[in-house]
Amino acid sequence: GLFGFGMNKSPNSLLAQTRRLLRQSDLRARKGLGQHFLIDQGVLETIISAAELSPDDIVLEVGPGLGILTRELATKAGGVIAIELDDKLAALLKKTLASFNNVTIVNDNVLKLEPKPGRVPISRMVLTAPILPPPTFLISAPFTSRAIM
């Protein structure tokens, strides 16, 4: 919940997993990049539900962070392309999500990437990086049929 209210305090909670992963990897949120980490199971479930994913979907996730959402997206969608600007987080994601053959980690700035012809069409986009000012919503067919922000 908001400000930690209603969050599970168990050792397997998203908060505990996040703290453990940050500590083990010697990482911290980089405020200059607007980094924040998903620690609320209810929010995670809401995002996954709102995305209405199927095995036919290819998801573009901008700002995957520690990969908590990425992992869930990968279990529901046919593929996930996760774009992470932070070099250390991208390296961690490549390691921790290596068992998912339907996940591609791209270590780059999404604002500087140019779409290449012949690429797989994106059917869903999950934007967790603060690259657009609120309340901007980006839904642009044919590249995305739904944007979850």
Image (spheres, rainbow, N blue to C red):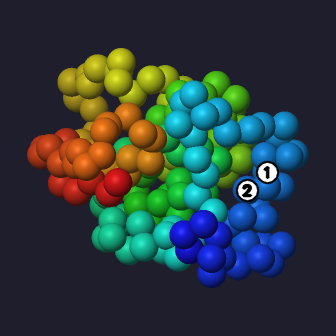
Q: Position of residue 121 (x, y in %)?
A: 24, 42
Q: Give the residue drawn at x 78%, y 65%.
A: 16
Q: Position of residue 104 (x, y in %)?
A: 51, 39
Picture quadrant where residue 62 is located:
top left
Question: Few, some or many C-alpha atoms within 10 Å of disc 1 (few <14, some 14-19, many ≥20)?
Answer: some
Establish if 131 lies above or below 69. above
Task: Indicate left or right for 39 with 2 as reference.
Answer: right
Task: Indicate left or right for 10 with 32 as reference.
Answer: right
Does residue 104 appear anywhere in the picture? no
Q: Amino acid at mark 2?
A: Thr
Q: Where does the N terminus fall, quadrant-wise?
A: bottom right
- Asked which secondary structure carries label 2, the reply is helix
The reply to whether the C-beta atoms of the residues labelled 1 and 2 are less than 8 Å apart is: yes
Question: Few, some or many C-alpha atoms within 10 Å of disc 2 (few <14, some 14-19, many ≥20)?
Answer: some
Establish if 133 lies above or below 42. above
Q: Give the residue drawn at x 42%, y 39%.
A: 130
Picture quadrant where residue 114 is located:
top left
Q: Nearer the viewer, residue 106 or 14?
A: 14
Q: Give the residue drawn at x 47%, y 35%.
A: 83
Task: Indicate left or right for 33 with 90 as reference.
Answer: left
Direction left: furthest residue: 141
Does residue 77 appear anywhere in the picture? yes
Q: Amino acid at mark 1?
A: Leu
How many discs appear? Answer: 2
Direction right: furthest residue: 24
- Asked which secondary structure carries label 1, the reply is helix
Residue that mark 2 sits on: 18
Tell me, for residue 21, which label it has, or none. 1
